[in-house]
Image (cartoon, rainbow, N blue to C red):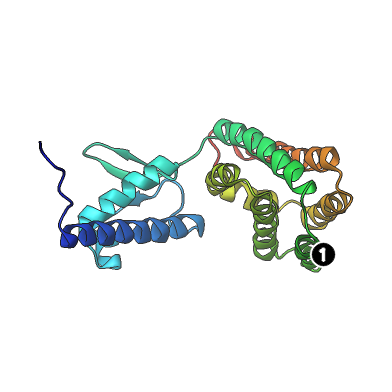
Amino acid sequence: MSTLLSPPAGSALALVQSTSLTRLVVESIEDMVLAGELPPGTKLNEIALAQRFGISRGPLREAFRSLEESGLIHQEKNRGAWVREIKLSEAADIYDVRAGLDACAGRLLAARITPEQLRTLREMTEAMRCVQPDDVARFHELNLSFHDCIVAMSGNAVLSAHYRKLCKLLVLFRRRNLQTPMAIPRFAEEHSAIVDLLEARDAPGVAEALFAHAQGGRLRMLRDGELTGGADAA
C-alpha cells in the first residue's frame, strides 16, 4: 500500500514565496494601469518590468496570466501583452451588471446598517459637498470609496469580489464622466440622498436609487462616446 509523501519543507516555502512574489507583481502592475501610468493599448515590456521589479521573467509571466484572467490585459502568442482597450459597447454591458450589483448591495445594507456605518457614509457625502467643481481627481477618489464602502458593508464576499473586478475595468470611464459641467455637485446630492434612504432602512428605495445612479453613469458614458468618436472609445 503506497503512501502520499508531503513535499519537502523547502519546496513548500519556495511555492509560498513564488506565489507571494507573483501577487505583489500583479498588484503593482494593476496599480500602474489604474493610475494611468500604463494606459489602455500600452504594450507591456517584459524586460523593462522585470528590471523595474528586480525579478526574473517567470513570476512576471505568471502575473500577466493573472491580470489577463481579471480582464486588465490581453496576451497574444509570440507577440506579447497589452493593457486592454475596452470597447464602448462592452463598457455599457459592464455598467448594466454593476448597476444590478449596486442595487443588491444597497438592499442588503439597508437591512443591517449600523449607526457607525451611517456615520462613515455621511462623512463621505459631506466631504463630497466640499469638493471644488474642477477637482475631478479628489471627487473620483471619494466616489470610489463611497460605493466600495456600501458594497463592503453589505457583508457579501461574492458580490464584493465581482464588483471590484468590474470597477477596475470601468475606472477610466467613470473618471471622464465626472468632467461634465456641474457633474460633481449633482453627484454629491445623489450620494447624500442614498444615505438618507439607508438611514430610513428603505431597502427598495436604496436599491432603486443606486440602480438609477449607475444607469445615469452608463448613459453619460454612451453620450460622451458618441460625441468623441464611436463604438471603440475607451
Q: Is residue 219 left or right of residue 19?
A: right
Residue 16: x %, y % from top left: 28, 59
Residue 64: x %, y % from top left: 32, 48
Residue at 68% in and 54% down:
153
Q: Is residue 213 left or right of residue 61?
A: right
Q: Is residue 156 left or right of residue 214?
A: left
Residue at 67% in and 65% down:
138
Amino acid type assigned to the residue bearing label 1 in the image: Arg
Q: In the figure, residue 84 lies in which quadrant?
A: top left
**Is the residue marked by circle 1 packed among few (<14), some (14-19), or many (20+) residues within 10 Å?**
some
In the image, farthest residue toward the front: 1
Residue 200: x %, y % from top left: 89, 50
* Above or below: residue 215 compared with residue 187: above
Q: Is residue 222 visible?
A: no
* Above or below: residue 65 compared with residue 192: above
Residue 156: x %, y % from top left: 62, 45
What residue would you read off at disc 1? 129
What is the quadrant of the N terminus in the image? top left
Q: Is residue 161 visible?
A: yes
Q: Secondary structure at mark 1?
A: helix
Residue at 21% in and 39% down:
78
* Viewer-closest of 95 and 222: 95
* Viewer-closest of 122 and 216: 122
